[in-house]
């Protein structure tokens, strides 16, 4: 049994897409040229610019609801503060349930502590 061909090879495809070719217009079809930039001079140097790359990593740390989960959260919180993480917001919750004959009462308190105002001063990484 012979080897099956999948059509054009990787080299052919990369030559079509990446190489400057005289017949490249054949492959462009009806492409949108809204972002096309025509060179205004014969200068082939790149314009001076600064590039800043940002990578945001978000972690969710969940602990099982056990009798000592709050101690685990406090230990994790302390560890992250020691590693120079900064506090943006702290959310606290408290629930008090009172029960008397003929009357049940539930008081739920939520406290959010956060930094108000201006942007980050850049002192923390």
Image (cartoon, rainbow, N blue to C red):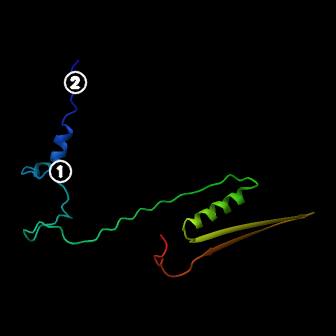
**Residue 42, located in which quarter of the rendered image?**
bottom left
Residue 1, percent across and down?
Answer: 23, 17
C-beta proximity under 8 Å, tags 2 and 1: no
Locate residue 97 relative to residue 46 in the image: left or right. right
Locate residue 119 relative to residue 48 in the image: left or right. right
Give the structural element (helix, strand or loop) at label 1.
helix
- The residue at 17%/50% (across/down) is 18
Give the structural element (helix, strand or loop) at label 2.
loop
Locate residue 84 relative to residue 30 in the image: left or right. right
- Up-down: is 28 above or below 98? above
Q: Please name whichever residue, 45 or 13, is drawn nearer the observer in this view of the structure.
A: 45
Label 1 Cα crowd, 10 Å radius (few <14 / some 14-19 / many 20+)? few
Residue 18's disc is 1
Q: Please name whichever residue, 90 or 16, is drawn nearer the observer in this view of the structure.
A: 90
Residue 83's disc is none
> Residue under circle 2?
3
Residue 97, percent across and down?
Answer: 82, 64
- Up-down: is 16 above or below 122? above
Residue 11, percent across and down?
Answer: 18, 41
């Amino acid at each position: 049994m012979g080897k099956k061909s999948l059509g054009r090879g990787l080299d052919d495809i990369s030559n079509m897409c990446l190489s400057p070719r005289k017949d490249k217009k054949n492959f462009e079809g009806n492409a949108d040229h809204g972002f096309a930039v025509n060179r205004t001079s014969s200068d082939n140097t790149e314009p001076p610019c600064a590039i800043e790359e940002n990578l945001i990593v978000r972690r969710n740390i969940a602990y099982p609801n056990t009798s000592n989960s709050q101690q685990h959260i406090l230990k994790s919180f302390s560890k992250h503060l020691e590693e120079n993480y900064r506090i943006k917001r702290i959310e606290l919750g408290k629930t008090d349930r009172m029960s008397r004959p003929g009357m049940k009462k539930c008081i739920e308190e939520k406290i959010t502590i956060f930094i108000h105002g201006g942007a980050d001063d850049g002192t923390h990484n």
